Amino acid sequence: MNLKLQHYSKEIKSLIKRFIKPFPTNVEYIRRLDEEFKIIEQKGFIRCFKQVSEIMRLAQGIPHLLRGSAASSLVCYYLGISNIDPIKNKIPLARFMNHTRDDQPDIDIDFPHWIRDEVIDRLHERYPGQVARISNRVMYKPKSAIREALRTFGYNKFLPKNFKLNKVVKDAEIRRRIREYADSLIGQQRMWSLHCGGVIVYNDKVPDNVMLDHSRSQIAIDKYDVEEQNLIKIDLLCNRGLSQLWEIDDTPLHQYPSEDKLTSELLCSGDVFGLTQAESRTMRKTLIALQPKSMYDVALALALIRPAAADGGRKASYLRHWQKGENKKQIIYDEDSINYISDLIKCSNSDADKYRRAFANQREGIIRKFVDKIKDFENKDKIINNLNQLNKYSFCKGHALAYGQMVWALAYNKARDRKTFWESTLKHCNS
C-alpha cells in the first residue's frame, strides 16, 4: 500500500480501489479527498458511493451525465461518476455533503432516454430481488376531487376536460353535497404513481410489505419516506440530449474541446434550435448577449436564466456589466450563496450551507438566527432580500457545468455536420 494511503480505514481503502484515476499526489487534491473521506466514513455513506460506482461499472460504454451537486465531490470524480473536476472548477463541497448534514448523498444520473431502462435491467440482474422503484404520492386536487365525488354519487359517464358541475348535475342540493365531499378529499392521497427514476437497492430482498407492483418492482415508498428512513436512493434518469449525441458521435462529453471557434460562432448567433436544454427564447437571448467563447460561458448562461439568478432585473444587470467586460459579483450558482454567507458572517461552509438551505426552503427559525447575526449591518435588508431569492429555482455549479458540456457538445456537432445533427435530433427529440 502506498504510504499516502496507509492512514485510511479498510472501508475507505475499499472505496479507493474503485477509483478509475490514479490517486493524486497534489496536496490540494489529497486534502480535499481527506475531507470527503472523513464525512463519508463518519456519516456512513460508503455503501452509497459503492452502489453508484457499481452502476457506473454496469453501464460501462453508455454515456451518462451527473446532474445536481454531486459533481462537487472529488470522490465522485475519481470513481468516474462525474467527469467534472471540482478542484479545477473551484466548486466547494458543502452543497453536496458536509459535517452538519446526515441525509444520504443525492446522486442523480442521466442516461440516453431509449437505453435507461436497460441500465435498470442490468441492475436487477446484478442484485436479483433487491432492486425497487420508488413511487410518488398523487394527492387529490380540486378537479380530481370533483371527479371522484361525482363517481361516489353514482355519476360514471364520460366527463370532458373542462366540464361544468352545474351542467352535469342539475339538482342544487346534490351539487352542494358533491362539492362538500370533494372539499373533504383535497389533500388526501389519491393514488401511487411510479417515480421517474428513483431506485433503491436493498441489502436483502425487497420487503413484501412495501411492494405495490411486482411486475415493475414498484414500492409504496416516496422520496420523503426515503429521507425519513435514511435509505439510499439513486435517481437513474432519461436525457434526450444524450440520445442525440450518442447517435451522432460516441465521444464522451468531457473530451470535447472547451473552446472552439465554430461552436462559439454558432452559439453567438443564437442558432439554438435542436440544442436540448438551450432552445428557449430566453436562453437564445442570453447567449447572444454573453457571446460565449467556451463551454464555461454556456454553463453560466444556463445558470443565469434560472429565476433565483434572473428575476428582479438581476440577469439584465449582470449582462450589462458583462458586455462592458466587467464580471459583476452576483449570486448565480448555489455555491455563490454559500461563499457569500461564509464571508459575510465568518462561518464554515457547512454552516453557510445550513443557512442557504433555510432561505431556499423558507425555514423561519434558522432564518431568524441568521438575521440576528447581521442585525447591526447597515445593508441587512438588501442581504436578506438577496438570500430570499434562493427560494426560487437555481442551478448549482456542477449541474450547470454538466449541462453546459452537453449543450456545447451538441453545438459542436451542429456546427460541423448539420445533416447528421438533424437526423439524430428528429429521431430522438419529442418537441
Image: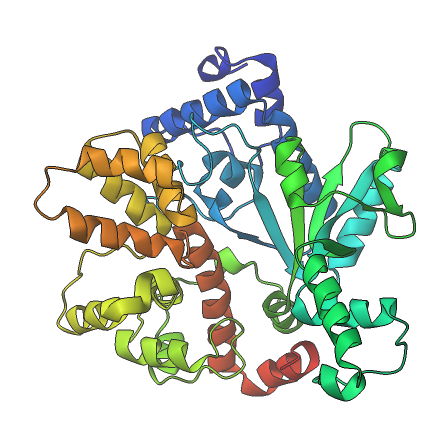
Residue 60 visible in the current orientation: no
| Residue closest to the eye, 49 or 206 | 206
On screen, residue 315 above or below 60? below
Q: Is residue 28 left or right of residue 430?
A: left
**Which image quarter: residue 79?**
top right
Q: Position of residue 424 (x, y in %)?
A: 65, 79
Viewed as shown, does residue 356 lie left or right of 340? Answer: right
Vertically, is 302 above or below 416?
A: above
**Residue lying furthest left:** 378
Does residue 108 lie above or below 354 as drawn? below
Residue 23 location in percent, x, y? 48, 28
Q: Is residue 274 depicted above or below 140 in this figure?
A: below
Who's the residue at 32% across and 40% down the image? Answer: 367
Residue drawn at 67 percent across, 59 percent down: 186
x and y percent of residue 418 in the render? 54, 86
Q: Can you name the residue that lies furthest to the front here?
A: 173
Where, quadrant-wise, is the N terminus in this rendering?
top right
Name the one closer to the observer, 175 or 6.
Answer: 175
Q: What residue is drawn where x is 63% and y is 30%?
A: 230
What's the colour scheme?
A: rainbow
- Image coordinates for residue 31, horizontal then vertical, percent: 36, 25
Please identify the quadrant where the C terminus is shown: bottom right
Question: Can you see residue 82?
Answer: yes
Residue at left 81%, top 83%?
Answer: 159
